[in-house]
Amino acid sequence: MSELIEISKGQTKNILLLNKSVDLLVNQYDDSQLNLHVFCLDDSSAEINIQVRQLGRGCSAKINALVLACGKQEVGIHTNVVHEVGDGISEQLLKFVLADESKGNFRGDLKIAKDAQKVSARQTNRNIVLSDKAKMRTMPQLEIYADDVKASHGASTGQLDEQALFYMQQRGLSVGTARKLLLKAFASEVMEQLDVAEHDSIEQLIEQRLARMAI
Amino acid sequence: MLEIKNLHASINGKEILKGVNLSVHAGEVHAIMGPNGAGKSTLSAVLTGNPAYEVTSGEVWFKGKNLLEMPPEQRAREGIFLSFQYPVEIPGVSMVNFMRAAVNEKRAYEGKEPLSATEFLKYMREKKSIVELDNKLTNRSVNEGFSGGEKKRNEIFQMAMLQPSLSILDETDSGLDIDSLRIVAEGVNKLKTPQTASIVITHYQRLLDYIVPDFVHVLADGQIVKTGDKTLALELEKHGYEMVVKQ
Ligand SMILES: Nc1ncnc2c1ncn2[C@@H]1O[C@H](COP(=O)(O)OP(=O)(O)OP(=O)(O)O)[C@@H](O)[C@H]1O
Ligand SMILES: [Mg+2]
């Protein structure tokens, strides 16, 4: 059973999920806003299920996720965003960094119903795999039934930029420090979306995590 | 300082360096010229330990140590600096953080304490003035969106920050306007001491008007085919490479 969260008309809800499995169903009513952050920054494997249903007009949903996995950790994120009515916005940015033999899984269902015109929906999934044994699986599923909408999705999985790494080593940085700086840059896009209040403590956790992963 | 003996290197199985020999002593400036594709950048990549290249035979000694056994960062900390022909853009990594890490890791290697934040900023200000680097550039990500000339100037700023004993300047003059060329070349000259040496890779005499070489080498098809003094560069400018490459 999913935990139900309802965001009533005109309300804003900020949710920060740190290092845990969850199963959420969020119902949004007119002009409400959801800002959801997911961080997986410790060793625990997690299954994260997030359903968002925009039931009223003029809603905005932002979902940001950063996963830093290592060892034999497995992290799965499944988002399911449904625009039942028009004028809504959804923006998803999900980033995974996978080291060692860790596994990442992202499934993103995005549905725009037939009468949900003027919806703007974006889903972006970017991943960096640091070892041959780490595996990322990405499955975007778009179902768009309305015609006057803006919907985009992009997914990519790659490695750290070899040329940037060499450039940094040429300046005397150890491989570990170079990787850490590049990974912090990769994470910063997710951090930019975060409220000031939590910013510093999360940044510290990222720092500690990267010190372990980027060697 | 640097001793290259019969160096052979290849990339993707294709041999590019076919027996390079070169000795560089402290206090010297060596210019390397030569046709496009001759292997000049390959030589700089091999000396700095770029993993894309494979050394198939030969030896390189730097200050009495076997250079080819060191990882790239150790070569850098030992004092080898490369001003890249194509500096790399690193979005999201600020110049300040990058340089702080570079300076402090080098200091740690030398057994020195890291610079404090204030000391570092003061040090950086000092070095920026050597090449008149715009303040705005150091607040941005490494080389990201820098113009061609700004990137080259930023390379020499980094050289000033790291104070290498051997600097390899790979076409640092390309992309620089007339005034920038003078400022950057004068910057390089200011960094010169009796304990340092430079290898200057260039296609044009005009850089060598400022940075006057003790030796000029012509690298063609993976080998140094001719060595002379600074007048060789003037001759090459007049007659092209045919005079040396043909024979
Ligand atoms: N990845 C690669 N695979 C195959 N050949 C390569 C690769 N990279 C470089 N080369 C070749 O190696 C040769 C030497 O290149 P290099 O960049 O060292 O030349 P250069 O002397 O610096 O030339 P320029 O004056 O144009 O800068 C060239 O023929 C180039 O095409
Ligand atoms: Mg070149």
Image (cartoon, coloured by chain):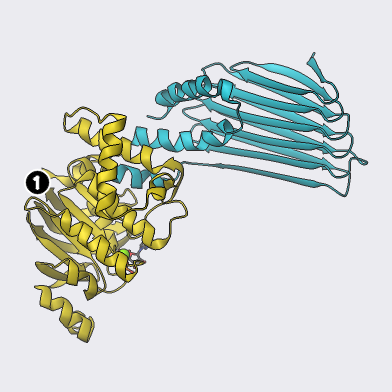
Chain colours: A cyan, B yellow
Q: Which residue is mark 1?
A: B63
Q: Position of residue A176 (x, y in %)?
A: 36, 32
Q: Quarter of the image holding residue B66?
A: top left
Residue A173 location (% of width, % of height): 30, 38
The chain under label 1 reads: B
Residue drawn at the location 41% of the way across and 30% of the way down: A214
Question: Which quadrant of the figure shows ligand 1?
Answer: bottom left
Which residue is drawn at the image coordinates 36% and 67% (left, top)? Answer: B175
Kindly identify the amino acid type of the residue bearing the numbered disc 1.
Lys
Residue B7 in view in this figure: no
Residue B236 image position (x, y, % from top left): 19, 80
Circle 1 packing at 10 Å, graded few (<14), some (14-19), many (20+), is some
Q: Position of residue B163 (x, y in %)?
A: 19, 46
Q: Is residue B128 above or below residue A135?
A: below
Left or right for A118, reference A21: right
Visible residue check, residue B56:
yes
In the image, residue B37 sits, relative to residue A209, either above or below, namely below
Q: Depth check: B210 or B200 in front?
A: B210
Asked if the residue at label 1 sits under 8 Å from ligand 1, the reply is no
User: Which residue is rendered at x = 62% and y = 15% of the image?
Assistant: A20
B124 or A168, nearer to the observer: B124
Identify the residue shown where x is 24% and y is 29%.
B114
Taking B113 as reference, is A179 above or below it? below
* Picture layout, residue A7 above or below residue B94: above
Lateral position of residue A191 relative to residue B217, left or right: right
